[in-house]
Image: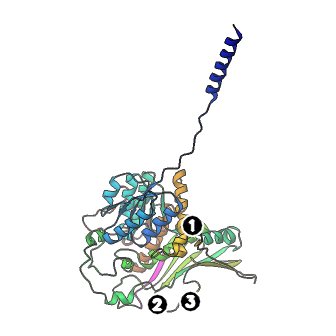
Amino acid sequence: MTRRDFLKQGSTALALSAAASYVPTTFAAEPKPKRVGLIGTGWYGKSDLYRLMQVAPVEVVSLCDVDKHLLNECADTCAQKNKSGKRPRIYTDYRQMLAEKDLDIVEVATPDHWHALAMIEACKSGADIYCQKPIGVDVVEGRAMVAAARKYNRVVQIGTQRRSTPHLIEAKERFIDSGALGRIISVDVCCYWHMRNGDTLATAPDTAPPDYLDYERWVGPAPMMPYNKIVHPRGWRAYMEFGNGIVGDMCVHMLDMIRWQLGLGWPKSVTSWGGILHDRKARADISDTQTATFDFDGFQMTWNHRTWGAMPDPDYPWAAIIHGEKGTLKQSVFRYDFIPRDGGPTIHKDQVMELDKYPEDKVEKDLEVHVAPAIRGHMKNLLASIETRSKPVADVEQGHISSASCILANMSMKLGRTLTWDSVKQEVIGDAEANAMLARPYRAPYTHPTPESV
């Protein structure tokens, strides 16, 4: 072998060796944006959707509402917020939207009486879900929703976002988990805001629905009643036909928060009394005064609401107050105060608004700015749970427990007696009349879902 041949052969060998060991440079691709659809483009539907868009690179591709004004307004805003600049597809029938089966996340923010049907169909479509509270208007709806989430292996977060409220998480860790409260003696939860639309509902006449609203479909499975301008948008909460009153709207948040903070499951029994005791002229049929006691087999949680008169504590008009052997912890969406029993100074904390980080919150129409950080936290928890296929902090079963507990309170008030609950059989013990009320009748042609039918 000549020197030239030797050098040539060596160079070839080195080149082959280098080629064998070469690993191409790779660049991490940006995660594909999750495709999102929203059913119900009203007040809280937009609040939830836009917070999700703040915390994740999602693409809103589908919107559904029976109100064409709300629908198109939301579509125009999403076109501005979407990174692609694309305007979402719009639908007036959520079944058509879900039939595309191209959504990763579906948000359900309809009035309460539509939650169950829309959420169950979203489970069948293969999407993970964010569903507003309460999860349904009756107990069997809630059971069916839990069954659907489990059957189709969907991650479902319920909009009881007190579990993701920063200062309330801090209060839990600082005063409850640490033992600073000592043994819990009792809990008071309350709402004294005047939120029944009484004066307006007393005078607003029935009219034909506006041409941009499909009122027949808006009513859906609920009992048909004449259209009134207060019913839509937002005023429907004043009618039991479409929700569960202030207990279903406001107590569910505080009761759920306390269950999370104290690690509670189902109440053993529920007792409630009250009714329309003050504002009898209004057409609203939800109670304006109500007390409910939830017995958790060790201590009681007592709810009070009154939509008239002065607030007992103006600093805590909507609140949860935990009484412990070592102190009292007052909590609301705005603040907390821990009052030690040993005479030490009160420990106070205000909520954090995050307006410096999210200045767009300052100008967003109808946004409850003080709730925005909690919704963002709730959305982050949902996204993390989707990645790990685990239960989120406000899993659908937790939403069912809290919602059904409030529904039982309304049933107790109507029947005039205590209801003892069997959480395994999901029925009221020894009370056939009460058990017949666990599922509301649906208006034809709608069919009430059951755990077996989903």
In contact (CB < 8 Å): disc 3 and disc 1: no
Residue denoted by label 2:
308
Which of the two residues, 323 or 428, is positioned nearer the viewer here?
323
Residue 359 location, x and y as percent? 55, 71
Q: The residue tagged with tag 1: helix, strand or loop?
A: helix
Residue at the location (30% across, 57% down)?
96
- Residue 134 falls in which quadrant of the image? bottom left
Which image quadrant is residue 111 in? Answer: bottom left
Q: Mark 3 points at which residue?
A: 312
Q: Which secondary structure type mostly characterizes the magenta part of the structure?
A: strand
Residue 337 location, x and y as percent?
66, 79
Q: In terms of depth relative to the viewer, which is nearer, 403 or 319?
A: 319
Badge 2 amino acid = Trp
Crowd rating for badge 2 (residues with CA inside 10 Å; few <14, some 14–19, many 20+): some
Where are the magenta residues, as a range?
Answer: 270-278
Q: Which residue lies furthest to the front in this view?
A: 4
Residue beneath disc 1: 164
Q: Alpha-carbon distance for marks 1 and 2?
A: 30 Å
Q: Farthest residue in the top direction?
A: 1
Kind of residue indicated by mark 3: Pro
Indicate the quadrant where residue 135 lies. bottom left
* Vertical order, 28 against 158 (above or below): above
Instruction: Specify whether 157 is left or right of 207.
Output: right
The quadrant in which the N terminus is found is top right
